[in-house]
């Protein structure tokens, strides 16, 4: 296998949120490398609440600062474009904080 993708949709949280994970990858030197990804939290009406992706459309965050890890960025629950590491574990941490403060 030279390339492929992974996709997962799972309901999380008490209010019927849906976590949608999509990663496209390829093998480079016998290692798995993620080419593009989208991590998306949707509400029960399938509206995006928060999303992280690697699409190269944005170069600066909502404060006008250059993205440190371009093209990785996060669209937060307030609609602001934020810095993001590109790591799924950091997206999960952000979700945990969201659910902790959202109640």
Image (cartoon, grey):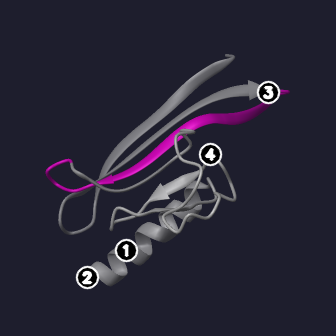
Mark 4 residue crowding within 10 angstroms, few (<14) / some (14–19) / many (20+): some
Q: From the image, tell me which residue sits under label 2.
A: 103
User: What is the spatial separation of the Cα atoms under label 2 and label 3, in whole angstroms?
Assistant: 42 Å
Kindly give the residue lying farthest to the front in the view shown. Answer: 64
Q: Position of residue 61 (x, y in %)?
A: 54, 61
Question: Which circle's residue, 2 or 3, is located before the other in the chain?
Answer: 3
User: CB under 8 Å between callouts 1 and 3?
Assistant: no
User: Which residue is found at the position 20% from the left and 69% from the top?
Assistant: 14
User: CB under 8 Å between callouts 1 and 2?
Assistant: no
Q: Position of residue 63 (x, y in %)?
A: 52, 69
**Secondary structure of the residue carrying numbered label 4:** loop
Question: Which circle's residue, 4 or 2, is located before the other in the chain?
Answer: 4
User: CB under 8 Å between callouts 4 and 2?
Assistant: no
User: Which residue is found at the position 56% from the left and 43% from the top?
Assistant: 54
Q: Is residue 1 left or right of residue 63?
A: right
Is residue 56 shown above or below 79?
A: above
Q: From the image, tell me which residue sits under label 4.
A: 71
Q: From the image, tell me which residue sits under label 1.
A: 98
Kindly give the residue lying farthest to the top in the view shown. Answer: 1
Question: Which circle's residue, 1 or 4, is located before the other in the chain?
Answer: 4
User: What is the spatial separation of the Cα atoms under label 1 and label 3, in whole angstroms?
Assistant: 35 Å
Q: Position of residue 74 (x, y in %)?
A: 49, 57
* Viewport quadrant of the C terminus: bottom left
Mark 1 residue crowding within 10 angstroms, few (<14) / some (14–19) / many (20+): some
Residue 33 drawn in magenta: yes
User: What is the spatial separation of the Cα atoms under label 1 and label 4, in whole angstroms?
Assistant: 23 Å
Q: Is residue 98 left or right of residue 18?
A: right
User: What is the spatial separation of the Cα atoms under label 1 and label 2, in whole angstroms?
Assistant: 8 Å
Residue bounds of the magenta highlight: 29-46
Q: Viewer-nearest of labels 1 and 4?
A: 4
Residue 102: quadrant of the picture:
bottom left
Q: From the image, tell me which residue sits under label 3.
A: 28
């Amino acid at each position: 296998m030279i390339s492929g993708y992974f996709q997962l949709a799972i309901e999380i949280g008490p209010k019927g949120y849906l976590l949608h994970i999509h990663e496209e990858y390829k093998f480079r030197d016998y290692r798995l490398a993620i080419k593009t990804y989208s991590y998306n939290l949707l509400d029960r009406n399938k509206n995006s609440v928060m999303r992280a992706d690697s699409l190269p459309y944005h170069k600066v965050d909502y404060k006008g600062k250059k993205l440190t890890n371009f093209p990785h960025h996060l669209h937060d629950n307030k609609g602001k474009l934020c810095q993001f590491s590109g790591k799924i574990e950091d997206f999960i941490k952000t979700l945990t904080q969201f659910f902790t403060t959202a109640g």
